[in-house]
Amino acid sequence: MDDFIENEHETVAANVAATARRNHAAIEIVGERRRAYTSAFRSRVVKASFESGFPVREVARQHGIHVSLLYRWRQDCRRRSRRPEEGSLVPVRLEEQVAQETQAPGQMEITFRDGSILRFGHDVPPERVERLIMLLRP
């Protein structure tokens, strides 16, 4: 009897395994490949998004692309337009400065309480400035 029960368990296990294989199909998950867009298509869509007057979301929908992709293309377009073109720089030759700049002589200014102003150059002796102040003071 024990042999019968043991054989019966083996038979049941084999039947369950066979049924599981038949009823469960293997599921294979394959992601969609990234689409490759030509530069002409990109340019056409970006131009339409800037010039059409339609919202960017609508332009993306009309062309069958995700709105975030169109925003990225627009951003790339702006970056490229800010970069200077190659060959736009011109060589410059620096020459030595011939004449040295001379500084203008300094000028002093004293404002009195009554609003009058005494201006004099740096070459006026201090004694003379002192005498002028004494004479002009009210």
Image: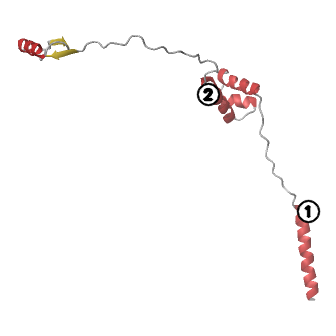
Question: As rendered, which of 13 and 80 lies closer to the eye?
Answer: 80
> What residue would you read off at disc 1?
22
Mark 2, secondary structure of its residue: helix
The answer to which quarter of the image holds residue 63 is top right
Q: Amino acid at mark 2?
A: Arg
Q: Amino acid at mark 1?
A: Arg
Left or right, 133 with reference to 34: left
Image quadrant in which you'd find residue 58? top right
The answer to whether residue 106 is seen in the rendering is yes
- How many dots with numbers? 2
Q: Report the residue marked by disc 2.
A: 79
Characterize the local packing of mark 2: few (<14), some (14-19) or many (20 or more) Cα atoms within 10 angstroms. Answer: few
Pick the residue in front: 72 or 124: 124
As rendered, which of 102 and 12 lies closer to the eye? 102
Question: In the shown orientation, is residue 135 left or right of residue 41?
Answer: left
Q: Residues within 10 Å of mark 1 (few under 14, many from 20)?
A: few
Taking the spot 65% from the left edge, 23% from the top edge, the residue there is: 50
